[in-house]
Structure formats: structure tokens, C-alpha cells
Image (cartoon, rainbow, N blue to C red):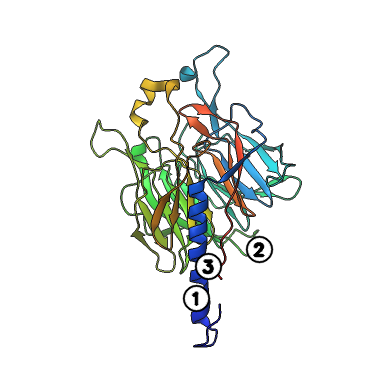
């Protein structure tokens, strides 16, 4: 972009960046409204699939570790089967190509699910979780070295947490606690941060520090995403659910969106999502977008025991949130809605692996999603 009125400088670079951002916003919104290109990947190799696994992209592979499922005996009732907490770890090699293939990559030290995970420069950050008892304070990295998966211990979390969320901005890990014990009434609103060392190895001086808590009630199954807002990289806490306000009432699904500004160390309320969003596959995309590829809107949450396996499944609705304009756009119907799934983003593609398609029903389906390319200004 050139101008005869003034020489190129920071101001025009800002104009160009804004123009590119607006072009991307329009292209992304159009692409999502028209429907993204979903391609099936090889099925997850542990039937019937898992939900709430640790997972994400590291060094070119998609990692899925732990999680939970239900496996009734032959002819048995799914709704009487106990929840099984898993420890198996698998990686999907070359997920962006037709040569994508799953391979076994060992086991976690203990079964675990409902933890939080996010990619970082040091490896896949994995925090908290549970295995049917009390929530855990565990914190570790999973690193793919090109042929095997390595596990690196991080400093324990300052509090136990399950059904929480994590995001990484630069080398700073942010953890939204989730539940600190059994029961949604223990859901917490505290946010913690941990600085990763430059060498990715020396964690002796890394210490968890408290950030201002998320406004409002404690919540579980929220999304936490790091994305640029046109000024800085911020965190976005989206949805989740909180305990009932009065005894005997159902849990409350949430539409709230809050933005945490690291530079100001403070939160601010943003535009609510069009519907409640819980345990959703949520990924950053482009310059300032966040894609919500499904999730539970809570419409049938109180009827699970009544519907059981006749539950129709979670609604196949997609949304895009633009952090720069603080606006939501509804997208096209999705081919699937796999809540509590593993997600990742790499090389202009998003990935969704395994998860839950309706209460107690896991899936082995895995997907590669081609994201629209940004339009360029003239």
C-alpha cells in the first residue's frame, strides 16, 4: 500500500495491518459461513474412542493421551458400565498429509482424563485432570523427538484442578483452575501463570504465580484461547458451566466471554457467545479469530438420564469470534460435533480427534480441517 501524501512509516504499517486483518476477517467469516473443508483422518486406534484426553500438536504430530470411556460387557447396558480412565498414548504422524497414521507411543504414569493441555515452545503442556478420585496437581510436558514421546515434569499446580483450561502466550502458561474437588460446586475462578525457561529444560526456578481471578462464578468445561486482538496477544475465556445458584436447581451453562490482557494484568467482559458453549473444540485461526467447532449448548443437559442413548447428539453449530471487533458470526452446520475432543492447529489446518458425540457415546472419528486463506488487500 502506497500513499503520495506521506512516506511509509509505522502509521501506514498499522493501516496495512488493519487492512489485512479486515480482509482476513471477511475471508474467514465467509469461509466458515460457507462451510469449512473437513477431511476424515484414520480412526483413533482405541475403540470406542476417548473424551477429555490430553492432546494437541507438537513437532508435527497430533498427540492423544489418556481420557476416559465406557465399555460395557457384550450385551451389557452402556448406562450401567463404569467410567474407565485411560493411560494409553497415541500420536498421529503426518496429520496434514494422506500418509497420516496412528502409532502407539507408550502410557501415562497413571490413568488420567479431564485435564487441560495446550502447545508451547517446550512441548505439549498437560495440567491437572482426574482418574475418578480427587483432582490432580500434576503438570508435565509431552515432547515428540521425531521417533518417540518424551515426558518432562513441570512444577506441580498450586491447587488441584480438573475440567479446567490452559492457554500459552509466548513462553507463559496460563491455567484456569476448573473444579478443585468432586462436584461442580467446587469450580474455581482462579487463573495461574508459569514462565517456561528459554532453554526448555531448566524448570527449577519456574514458579506458579496468581493472576487476577476470572470475574464471575467459578466454572468448569470453559475454553481458554490465546489470540491477538489487534493490539496484543490476549486470553479469551469462553463459556463453561457453573453450579446452580439455588439448591435443587440444575447447573448453569454459560455464554460469557472474558478477555484477559497480560499487559494490564486485568480482565474485561466481551460480547457473549450466541449460545452457551461447554467442552467445545475451540481453536485460534488467522490474525484475530477464534473458531468454535461445536460444543454442548446445555439445551438437553437436564434430560440426560431421561433420554440416555436416544439423545440426538450435540448440535452441529459453528461460530467464529473476532477478537479485534468483538463480534460473533454463526457458521455453517458441521459434519460432526465431538465435545471434549483433542484439537490442534498447524500449517493452515485444524485437527479434531476422538471425543464424545452424545452422553457416554465416544467416537473414534478424527478430522483434518482446511482453514480459509486470508484475502490480501489490493
Earlier in the chain: of badge 2 and badge 1, it is 1
**Spatial CA span between label 2 and label 1:** 33 Å
Asked if 293 appears above or below 234 in the picture, the reply is above
- Name the residue carrying label 2: 199
Residue at 36% over, 43% down:
275
Q: Provide the residue designation for mark 1.
A: 14
Counting residues from the start of the chain, the first of labels 3 and 1 encountered is: 1
| Sequence-wise first label, 2 or 3 | 3
In the rendered image, the residue lying farthest to the right is 147
Q: Residues within 10 Å of mark 3 (few under 14, many from 20)?
A: some
**Residue designated by label 3:** 20
Is residue 257 depicted above or below 45 in this figure?
below
Expressed as whole percent of the image width and height from the top left, the position of residue 337 reads 50, 36
Q: Are marks 2 and 3 in contact (CB under 8 Å)?
A: no
Instruction: Give the spatial CA distance, label 2 vs label 3.
Output: 34 Å
Mark 2: secondary structure? loop
Viewer-nearest of labels 3 and 1? 3
Amino acid at each position: 500500500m502506497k500513499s503520495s501524501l506521506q512516506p511509509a512509516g509505522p502509521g501506514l504499517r498499522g493501516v496495512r495491518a488493519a487492512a489485512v486483518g479486515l480482509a482476513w476477517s471477511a475471508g474467514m467469516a465467509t469461509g466458515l459461513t460457507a462451510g469449512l473443508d473437513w477431511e476424515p483422518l484414520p480412526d483413533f486406534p482405541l475403540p470406542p474412542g476417548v473424551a477429555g484426553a490430553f492432546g494437541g500438536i507438537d513437532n508435527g504430530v497430533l498427540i492423544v493421551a489418556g481420557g476416559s470411556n465406557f465399555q460395557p460387557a457384550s450385551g451389557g447396558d452402556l448406562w450401567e458400565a463404569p467410567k474407565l480412565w485411560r493411560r494409553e498414548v497415541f500420536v498421529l504422524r503426518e496429520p496434514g498429509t494422506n500418509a497420516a497414521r496412528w502409532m502407539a507411543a507408550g502410557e501415562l504414569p497413571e490413568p488420567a482424563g479431564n485435564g487441560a493441555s495446550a502447545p508451547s515452545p517446550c512441548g505439549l503442556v498437560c495440567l491437572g485432570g482426574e482418574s475418578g478420585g480427587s483432582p490432580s496437581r500434576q503438570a508435565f510436558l509431552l515432547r515428540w523427538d521425531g521417533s518417540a514421546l518424551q515426558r518432562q515434569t513441570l512444577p506441580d499446580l498450586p491447587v488441584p484442578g480438573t475440567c479446567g483450561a490452559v492457554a500459552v502466550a509466548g513462553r507463559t502458561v496460563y491455567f484456569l483452575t476448573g473444579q478443585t474437588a468432586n462436584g461442580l460446586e467446587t469450580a474455581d475462578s482462579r487463573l495461574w501463570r508459569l514462565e517456561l525457561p528459554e532453554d526448555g529444560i531448566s524448570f527449577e526456578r519456574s514458579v506458579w504465580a496468581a493472576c487476577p481471578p476470572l470475574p464471575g462464578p467459578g466454572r468448569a468445561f470453559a475454553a481458554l484461547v490465546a489470540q491477538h486482538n489487534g493490539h496484543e496477544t490476549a486470553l479469551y475465556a469462553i463459556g463453561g458451566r457453573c453450579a446452580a445458584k439455588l439448591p435443587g436447581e440444575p447447573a448453569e451453562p454459560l455464554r460469557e466471554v472474558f478477555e484477559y490482557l497480560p499487559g494490564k494484568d486485568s480482565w474485561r467482559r466481551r460480547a457473549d457467545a450466541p449460545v452457551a458453549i461447554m467442552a467445545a473444540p475451540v481453536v485460534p485461526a488467522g490474525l484475530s479469530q477464534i473458531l468454535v467447532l461445536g460444543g454442548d449448548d446445555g439445551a438437553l443437559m437436564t434430560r440426560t438420564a431421561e433420554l440416555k442413548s436416544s439423545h440426538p447428539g450435540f448440535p452441529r453449530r459453528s461460530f467464529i469470534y473476532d477478537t479485534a471487533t468483538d463480534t460473533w458470526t454463526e457458521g455453517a452446520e458441521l459434519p460432526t460435533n465431538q465435545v471434549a475432543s483433542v484439537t490442534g492447529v498447524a500449517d493452515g489446518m485444524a485437527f479434531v480427534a476422538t471425543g464424545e458425540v452424545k452422553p457416554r457415546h465416544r467416537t473414534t472419528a478424527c478430522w483434518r480441517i482446511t482453514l480459509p486463506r486470508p484475502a490480501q488487500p489490493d
